[in-house]
Amino acid sequence: MGPAAAARFRALPQDARTLLAPLVETTWRFYLAAALLGAITLWGVVAYVLQFRFGLGRTGLNQPEYWGIYIIDFVFFIGISHAGTLISAILRISKAEWRRSITRSAEFITVLVIGFGAIQPIIDLGRPDRLLNVFTNAQLRSPLLWDVISIGLYFAASTIYLYLPMLPDLAIIRDAGIKAPRFYRFLAAGYGDTPDQRARLERVIGVLAIVVIPIAVSVHTVIGWIFAMTLRPMWHSTIFGPYFVMGAIYSGIAALLIAMVVLRRVYGLHDYFRPIHFDYMGRLLLLFSLLWFYFTVAEYLTAFYGAEPAEMRTFWAKVWGPFAVPFWTMVLCCFVVPLGLMWRKATRTPRGTLVASVAVVIGMWLERFNIVVPTSVNPRFEFEAAARYFPSWVELSILAATFSGFILLYMVATKFFPIISIWEMREGREASVREVSERVAGYLPPEPAAAD
Amino acid sequence: MPRWGMVIDLDRCTGCAACEVACKSENNVATASPDQAAMGRAISWMKVMTEVHGEFPDNRLRFVPRPCMHCDNPPCVKVCPVAATYISPEGIVGQIYPRCIGCRYCANACPYTVKYFNWYEPTWPASERAHLNPDVSVRPKGVIEKCTFCHHRLQKAREDARAEGRELRESDYQPACAEVCPTQAIVFGDLDNVRHRVNELRHDPRAMRLMEDLGTAPKVYYLTPRQ
């Protein structure tokens, strides 16, 4: 940043200065973390090149364990992507005023993670070179095709839903002239923040927030259906659609909370991510831990009570057999820990929500594992010898690279875009306080006339 | 139109696995190395399953040869995103190797676990490499393969019958496993043709199909053991 730009930066109002600081100054810690994450990501790329060259034999997969880490990651990361758009859309529609500092960071999670999720089934393909067959020979009967459509739609919708509410901020950066003027002039697309433009923008955001909800719900429903449409024991279940959506939002909230804690710390955003935000998000997490428990009991009790032999083989493999450790760790991480921490206000603090959220993210990854693997190794045809699955170093490297690649991309994004919406904070200060008191007044019967 | 199917008499099966061997050499099935086989990656379109009854030393073995069931309502065909697995008008479920993208959804959807994946480029011992069957395409790495009822033999039998100006006879088209079975436990033919033995045998009181309750309507029948 040159001295002229530095002077312009200092002239900005307080909110903008705090929120744009990450765009203009970068610490050595950032470069160190980026280098480390970049190295892990590159390592994963090397692993994939080997797999591409020699074949899927480089994984630990076998017959009948056809799907492993990649499909688990596919379900998991697309689930994480439900954080943003869905939470932000629901909070916007319900006029939850505390959303203002949260929505942007949530929407960024969605847009940046969805690619890492969508690439997993491609990594899992035996013939990635024939990927375009999915379009040239599309067979709409296949749930995989439904997925291609809904994920494509979701990616498009959530990218627009991230970009449009960012326009006024991009215009602020352009006008301040603190960084890469051409880049921001292009992105701001001539937005001038006139009252007319602002009104139109808010109308479009309102429509998008509604449109994006059914799309987001459809995405994880269809992913659940990939499994549920087969006749496999413990997959062939009507609960899978809603169960996957619920789990996706659950892991998404947890990922968002982790991001909030980290952003607050590294960029000193304590005034924006306030204890009240963690309290409210913690309540959401609490609600979803209870929902998770309800759905899980419904699923397992139905299978257990019906007691079909094929279902029971998978059931016992999870509850008491070779998968008991991942199963009960999942219950601990998805239910016991978040419930224990989130039901008390005293632990709905940044630190408490961080612990609960890390547990939920681990637990939800394990849940995807517990869905994919135990059913795979217990085929319906009972003559088949019991199979085993040990992920190879190639699979584990790609798993690590997916996590590091996403975090790296998110970090880099915070260097180019304000991770908290500047204009929405300003709007909150200038207009919403008054609007909310007027709205509350509107809920009440008119004030009685002065005592007569 | 014929509806090709198979009846396997479990009373006659001795578990010799000649069907497995004949299938592998007829269909150019790759040879898995011992460590790959130990990982569960050996390919066997026809597989003799073994069930052990009783406690030692009073054991009894039961053998169940398991080819593809060639379901009339195949779950694998429905889920394929690129229509690489299909059912022919005569009921044979096949795989288009050059189109398959290797997602393995069909393999997961099959309740009988009959679909195999090429984890690596297929390999053969040098002595076998020279004797591959020219009528059957060799699969590349990364695609699914499966039992086809040796449908290349049907093509050849049809051409022969047409050249000789006659109808296709039951004996003209037999898959390798049925042809080689020393006890004639495997009988193959047109399930709907009253002159074919399979038609008679599938109405036998001992006849049953695997997991009939799933509604997949397999075209492979088993005659259950008498005792």
Image (tube, rainbow, N blue to C red):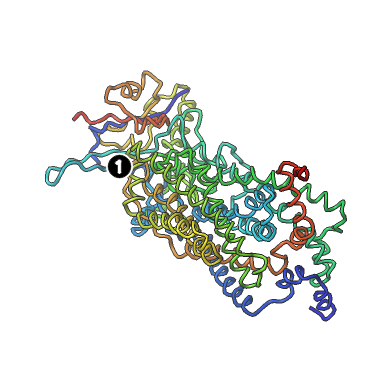
**Residue type marked 1:** Val
Percent x, y of residue A11:
83, 74
> Could you tell whether B175 is left or right of A212 in the image?
left
Percent x, y of residue A350:
56, 66
Image vertical order of residue A29 relative to residue B148, above or below: below
- Residue A180 sits in quarter: bottom right
Percent x, y of residue B203:
32, 21
Say which chain tag 1 marks: B
Q: Looking at this view, is B58 or B4 the one in front?
A: B58
Q: Looking at this view, is A72 or A381 the one in front?
A: A72
> Count the marks: how many?
1
> Could you tell whether A106 is left or right of A427 in the image?
left
Q: Looking at this view, is B140 or A4 the one in front?
A: A4
Image vertical order of residue B158 relative to residue A83, above or below: above
Percent x, y of residue A153:
66, 46
Q: Could one spot residue A135 in this view of the protein?
A: no
Q: Looking at this view, is A126 or B8 the one in front?
A: A126
> Could you tell whether A383 is left or right of A117 in the image?
left
Q: Could one spot residue A175 in this view of the protein?
A: yes
Question: What residue occupies the far top of the structure in this picture?
Answer: B194
Which residue is located at x 45 percent, y 26 percent? B161
Dot 1: within a 10 Å radius of its alpha carbon, few (fewer than 14), some, or many (20 or more) residues? many
> Could you tell whether A189 is left or right of B2 in the image?
right
Kindly state the secondary structure of the residue where label 1 is placed.
Answer: strand
- Residue A294 sits in quarter: top left
Image vertical order of residue A358 relative to residue B174, above or below: below
Quick one: quadrant of the C terminus of chain A? top right
Location of mark 1 (residue): B48
Quick one: quadrant of the N terminus of chain A? bottom right
